[in-house]
Image (tube, helix red, strand yellow):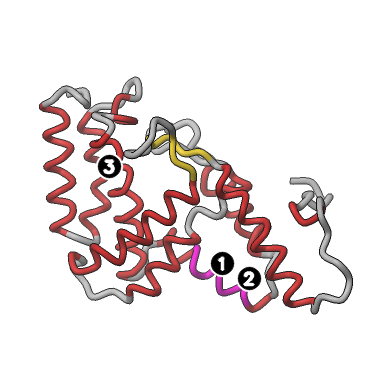
């Protein structure tokens, strides 16, 4: 991005004078992250004939954390893990979605998303910006049980949607069932039981011809 400030959503309808500065920054951020609802992912919805957006994906992960936490191999703080999954894809507002099976698009993904994190979280007051960035870094680095479980949910959720779509993105040209297993294996870093279930679904999908052998 150039040195010129990005035009924000609040620039279209500026807040009136008189708002306290900290609150103004917080509201500006909250309006800007409404953009997450416009970022389309590759995964198909189970309930409608369209692709999901990032906001729907993040909500679904939060629900999964609450329901599936009992399957974590290590004890996790559910509230903390929910925070991780709710903010992990916010950077895609500026960096865009990078499809899991698109190796070329993933080459500069880390750099694009780090720059987006600096810019987006920088809209917040300094203390909250630092905390949000630390949570995002925690998710990316998977250095805690919570982050590992959050990442597992991020891999398991589209697996479930692809199963419901009888293949979905598993049918991407050039993608094989073995590559799907490789990309999803990170689930096992957090939950042996969930990865066993995930492998079972992939194996059955391959048997049914929903993923290439």
Reading the image, the residue beneath label 1 is: 133
Determine the CA span between mark 1 and mark 2.
6 Å
Answer left or right for 5 relative to 135: right
Does 119 sit left or right of 193 as displayed? right
**At x 26% / y 43%, what residue is drawn?**
160
SS category of the residue bearing label 3: helix
Where residue 102 appears, x then y in whole percent?
A: 43, 32
Q: For the residues marked 3 and 2, what is the alpha-carbon distance in whole angstroms?
A: 32 Å
Left or right for 209, reference 160? left
Could you tell me which secondary element the residue under label 1 belongs to?
Answer: helix
Picture coordinates of residue 163, whole percent (x, y)? 23, 36
Magenta residue check for 1:
no
Locate residue 202: give its quadrant.
Answer: top left
Q: Residues within 10 Å of mark 3 (few under 14, many from 20)?
A: many
Q: Quadrant of the C terminus?
A: top left
Local crowd at mark 2 within 10 Å, few (<14), some, or many (≥20)? some
Whether residues under marks 1 and 2 lie with C-beta atoms below 8 angstroms apart, the answer is yes
162 vs 154, nearest the viewer:
162
Q: Which residue is mark 2?
A: 129
Magenta highlight on residue 135: yes
Circle nearer the N terminus (3, 2): 2
Between disc 3 and disc 2, the foreground one is 3
- Picture quarter containing residue 179? top left
Tell me which segment is drawn in magenta: 128-136
Q: Residues within 10 Å of mark 1 (few under 14, many from 20)?
A: some
Earlier in the chain: of badge 1 and badge 3, it is: 1
The residue where tag 3 is placed is 159
- Residue at 34% over, 60% down: 63
How far from the left and from the top, in percent, is residue 144?
A: 34, 70
């Amino acid at each position: 991005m150039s040195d010129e400030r990005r035009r924000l959503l609040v620039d279209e309808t500026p807040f009136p004078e008189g708002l306290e500065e900290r609150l103004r920054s917080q509201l500006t951020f909250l309006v800007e992250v409404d953009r997450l609802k416009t970022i389309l992912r590759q995964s198909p919805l189970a309930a409608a004939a369209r692709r999901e957006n990032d906001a729907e994906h993040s909500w679904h992960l939060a629900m999964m954390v609450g329901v599936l936490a009992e399957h974590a191999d290590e004890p996790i703080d559910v509230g903390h893990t929910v925070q991780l999954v709710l903010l992990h894809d916010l950077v895609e507002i500026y960096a865009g979605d990078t499809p899991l099976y698109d190796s070329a698009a993933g080459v500069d993904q880390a750099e694009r998303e780090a720059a987006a994190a600096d810019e987006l979280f920088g809209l917040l007051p300094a203390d909250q910006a630092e905390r949000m960035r630390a949570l995002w870094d925690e998710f990316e680095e998977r250095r805690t049980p919570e982050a590992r479980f959050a990442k597992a949910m991020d891999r398991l959720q589209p697996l479930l949607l692809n199963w419901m779509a009888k293949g979905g993105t598993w049918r991407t040209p050039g993608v094989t069932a073995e590559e799907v297993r490789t990309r999803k294996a990170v689930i096992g870093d957090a939950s042996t039981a969930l990865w066993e279930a995930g492998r079972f679904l992939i194996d059955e999908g391959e048997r049914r011809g929903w993923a290439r052998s």
